[in-house]
Amino acid sequence: MNGEFVAWDDAKVHVLSHGLHYGTGVFEGIRCYETERGPAIFRHREHLQRLAQSAELYYMDLGYAPDELRQATHELIRRNDLRACYIRPLAFRGYGEMGLYAQDSPIEVMIAAWPWGAYLGDEGKREGIRAKVSSWRRISPAGLIPHAKASGQYLNSILAKTETAKAGYDEAILLEQDGTVCEGSGENVFIVREGEIATPGHTASILDGISRKSVIQIATDLGYTVVERDVSRSELYLADEMFLCGTAAELVPVREVDDHEIGPPGELTRLIQSKFEDALHGRAQEYLEWLDFVEVPSKVTS
Ligand SMILES: Cc1ncc(COP(=O)(O)O)c(C=O)c1O
């Protein structure tokens, strides 16, 4: 936290922190996996690059180079003796100017790491989840920055998630202002129709997900064509297969949308999911370059 290692219980902020009031923060969600060669952070550099870009978009100076954050994260994992964990870097405007133009407020930077299971559950990953289109539209580039991973923007995801969870569904799908499909509350969306894999393009109001990029690469390497294009709501209902992907949720099949049955996880979803899991856990030779291995002292076995 701000350059120091701080005990969990002491990681506190002032109640007048700007970010707490106005959501002026940028963050990342990153995962580290246990592999045969020790803990490995999936696409760490890309996540840190996106953090820097989110900061830039909100006129925030992180004050640390991506490699400094990377080294601090490695040390955090070592000190906590973690293997598989979720990593949350956050930079936010701290205690200082309370007005909206707070360019002089200090930027506080923290990184936390803790063990955290699959966001939509292991059963969801195996059997598929039930999703519902939210009545809340995804934030538009006319008013916010969909491509930034900024704290305040997540009120949009939280409204959608809360609405659909209260209605008894596992995840929310958000639409663009014009009614085309955007993404899940914390995941990107893919459908399979008549052998074509489609996902909303990166100029849609989506977070340009790192899992999304990885899935596109994997599907392409498997010989499939992934088309980035507008996806209509009814295409979700008519899809042969559908899945979501994101760092927290990983790759999750969708078996039902708005009470339209898609069915149990399909063949293509399974194939891509299994390759994706191999990539995350360091079992896919061709994607080893996606992993940032953390040097940890070898365990002494007696
Ligand atoms: C709104 C939203 N869309 C998509 C994603 C997936 O992005 P990634 O695969 O980089 O985790 C996330 C998760 O970070 C998200 O919060």
Image (spheres, helix red, strand yellow):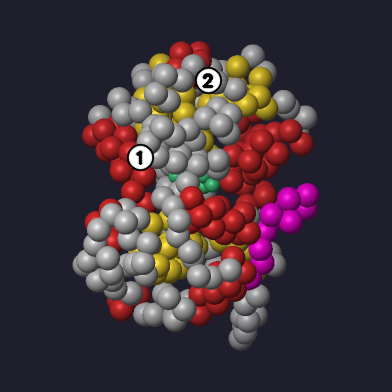
Disc 2 to disc 1, C-alpha distance? 19 Å
285 drawn magenta: yes
- Residue 285 at x, y = what percent? 77, 53
Quadrant containing the N terminus in the rendered view: bottom left
- Magenta stretch? 282-294
User: Along the polypeptide, which appears first: circle 2 or circle 1?
Assistant: 1
The disc at residue 23 is none
Residue at which label 2 appears: 231
Residue 192 visible to the viewer:
yes
Category of crowding for the residue at label 1, using alpha-carbon neighbours closer than 10 angstroms: few (below 14), some (14–19), many (at least 20): many
Name the residue located 21 percent from the left edge and 67 percent from the top edge. Answer: 15
Q: Nearer the viewer, residue 165 or 136?
A: 136
Residue 35 relative to residue 246: left or right: right
- Name the spot of residue 80 as percent of width and height, x first: 48, 76
Taking 146 as reference, is 259 above or below it? Answer: above
- Mark 1 CB lies closer than 8 A to ligand 1: yes
